[in-house]
Image (cartoon, rainbow, N blue to C red):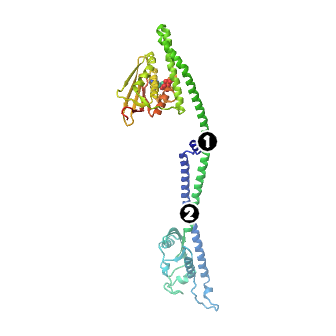
Amino acid sequence: MGEVRRMGMERPPARFVLMITAVFVVACTAYVAWSQHGYESSVEDKALAEARTLNTEIMAAWDYVSASQNAINYNSDGKYDFKGIYCAAAGKSIASRFTTESEGYVIRYVRENPRITSGIPDEFEQAALDRFELERVSEHYAVAEYEGRRVFRYASVLVMERNCLGCHGSPVGEKDEMGFLKEGMELGDIGGAASIVIPLEQYEEQARASMRGGIAFFSILLLVVLASVNFGYHRWVSAPIRQANEVLRKENEAKSDFLALMSHELRTPLASIMAFSDILSESAELRGEQERKAVREIGENSLVLLNMVNNTIDAAKIEAGRYSVAREEVDVFDVVNEVFDLMEPSATKRGVSLRKSLAADIPILACDYDALRKILVNLVGNAVKYSENGSAVVVRASYSPDAEGRLAVSVSDTGRGIAPEDQKRIFDRFERGSAQATSVSGSGLGLFLVKSICDELGGDVTVESKLGEGSTFTVTLPARSCEDGQ
Ligand code: ADP
């Protein structure tokens, strides 16, 4: 049940999902940064257009009142009667009304040495007046702070025209019709600035809304892409792989079962061959030397065959996950002696002597007797097989009663050695290294089995070897002493 659920919910690798998410986050950040940049420049353009329109509208009223002075001040009987409705008064009162009635907007008129205090320029306006004077520009604008708010500020130059001179022209000091002293200005002189403040809240809100829309769009797109990737991965990648794996697993299982069955069936006739060769060898002194040799050959080869069959069965069990480990009392001396008894005939035949050096303090261990025997049969068998006539194979064993208890067994020979590039792969299944090309027979299963059994026991196997000088295989296994209850 758990297996089915796991397979049904298979997801694309986390790194892949992270990578897609990262791409989207980067794209979204770039979008926000780019929008921000676009917003900054477009806000200025929009606010400038709005300020120019406002300025033009009020100046139009200003000009209209200026052009209508005669109509305003001459009565129907042709007599001049100044009514006090002049251009600056009209422009300023429209501006002041607009300022009080609109949210955040300010329009006012400023100049140096103004006639009334409300016309005194602030820092921005003074800068505008300076630029009008020195650089002869007609506008000055910027995004700036105004009364604690971020606003767009605009100033437009006011130039003395003919109809302005009646109040501001010559002679200097003479009173104009409103009672103000004339300043002696001339045509074309700079008479001040129209100063306009445009609030930016509306534009900022627009930008925030568009940014929120962009982020929401990217988030939804990310979800859609992840869902599609998830679906696509499941449908077109993981499901076919899983199906193919399932087919392979079944085929492999069938092959392993077949091998195990065949090997098992081989053991029965092999056992009787070995039994009869034993019987024959016991009565061998009655026969000639040639017959005795033939009987010995039958016995030894049957042993080799039995070892191969056993290895095949164990390898199939390990592959199928059916290899079980026993916990029993094991005397390492017994195991080594049994392996030596088994290997003695083939070692003698090859002129190889078997020696052991077992630490006397190795206790009785809680371990798997059969597993340890199989490991040593394969290692000692190989050491004999790959050694020269006259050499020796030494089995060493020691025990360290550390936290867990640890048994170390090594098998050394002075045989042909193993090339460095082969030392790792010889533990793979059916891997024979350089022996493949020689006449030494083998299946390439022995070391695979040694390594697999060590893994099952929670241990490890390593090799140290030099070509032409020999090899040492060392097996380390966790094994508690049965004697002191460690
Ligand atoms: P095989 O049946 O070929 O001996 P193994 O799995 O037992 O298979 O060993 C794999 C290969 O490792 C061997 O074919 C051989 O090349 C190399 N090998 C194993 N033990 C020794 C050794 N003691 N000396 C030299 N080569 C060895």
Please identify the residue farthest to the left as the structure is shown: 361
Which label lies toward us, 2 or 1?
Answer: 1
Residue that label 2 marks:
208
Q: Secondary structure at mark 2?
A: helix
| Lower position in the chain sequence, tag 2 or tag 1 | 2
The residue lying toward the viewer, choosing from 474 and 390, is 474
Q: Residue at x 56, y 59 (%)?
A: 35
Residue 243 place in picture, x, y as percent: 61, 38
Q: Amino acid at mark 2?
A: Arg
Considering only vertical position in the picture, is 35 above or below 333? below
Mark linked to residue 57 = none
The 10 Å Cα crowd at callout 1, few under 14, some 14 to 19, many 20 or more, is some
State how many labels appear: 2
Residue that label 1 marks:
239
- In which quarter of the view is residue 316 placed? top right
The residue lying toward the viewer, choosing from 255 and 338, is 338
- In which quarter of the view is residue 2 placed? top right
Considering only vertical position in the picture, is 287 above or below 479? above
Residue 200 place in picture, x, y as percent: 54, 68
Residue 420 place in picture, x, y as percent: 45, 28
Would you say residue 190 is visible in this rendering? no
Q: Amino acid at mark 1?
A: Ala
Residue 285 place in picture, x, y as percent: 46, 8
Q: Residue at x 45, y 17 (%)?
A: 345
Q: Secondary structure at mark 1?
A: helix
